[in-house]
Image (cartoon, rainbow, N blue to C red):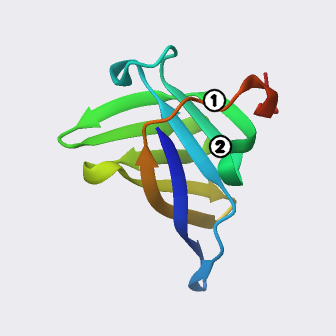
Amino acid sequence: MRCDIKSLSVCAAGGCRSAAPAISIYLSDFMDGSSERAAYYRCGPALTNCDRYAAIVHRTGEFTIFSLPARSLFAKLGPGNQVTDVAAVGDTVFVSRGLCEHAAPPPASELRSR
């Protein structure tokens, strides 16, 4: 699932603010018929300059959660293919929201970590 981020909230101890989205993500698990299992790609816009990570995938009700606990990151895919992506860096939390659609994974030429 290719996910285009439409909004970003950046939250720290002093509160939250909106910011311009600067990422796209790709989520893949064995249930979506893809050729790979439980992968999370964090990319620049339009699935460029991607980092690929193995993810832990959980399903709860209508939601599929892709978790990367060692990176303080998770993405929650919900009804209507809406995604909420949460990443923590230090004491700052980045909450990205967008919409996903079925698409091929990023090409190998766009991977930064192989």
Q: Is residue 104 above or below residue 65?
A: above
For discs 1 and 2, the disc positioned in front in the rendered view: 2
Residue 33 x %, y %: 38, 18
- Check disc 1 and report its element: helix, strand or loop: strand
Q: CA distance from mark 1 to mark 2?
A: 8 Å
Q: Is residue 82 above or below residue 77?
A: below
- Could you say which disc has been placed on residue 42 in the image? 2
User: Left of 10 or right of it: where is 112?
Assistant: right
User: Left of 5 or right of it: where is 53?
Assistant: right
User: Quick one: 17 or 70, which is closer to the camera?
Assistant: 17
Residue 93 x %, y %: 58, 65
Q: Is residue 14 above or below residue 64?
A: below
Q: Quadrant of residue 104?
A: top right
Q: How many other residues sit within 10 Å of disc 2, few (<14), some (14-19) or many (≥20)?
A: many
Residue at 52% from the left image edge and 16% from the top image edge: 36
Residue 3 x %, y %: 51, 48
The answer to whether the residue labelled 1 contacts the one labelled 2, judged by CB atoms less than 8 Å apart, is: yes
Q: Quadrant of residue 68?
A: top right
Residue at 69% from the left image edge and 45% from the top image edge: 43
Amino acid type for the residue under numbered disc 2: Arg
- Check disc 2 and report its element: helix, strand or loop: strand
Query: Tag count in the figure?
Result: 2
Residue at 77% from the left image edge and 31% from the top image edge: 111
Residue 83 x %, y %: 41, 53
Q: Which residue is denoted by mark 1 in the rendering?
A: 53
Identify the residue at the far top of this view.
35
Q: How many other residues sit within 10 Å of disc 1, few (<14), some (14-19) or many (≥20)?
A: some
User: Quick one: 3 or 15, which is closer to the camera?
Assistant: 3
Q: Is residue 83 above or below residue 67?
A: below
Residue at 81% from the left image edge and 28% from the top image edge: 109
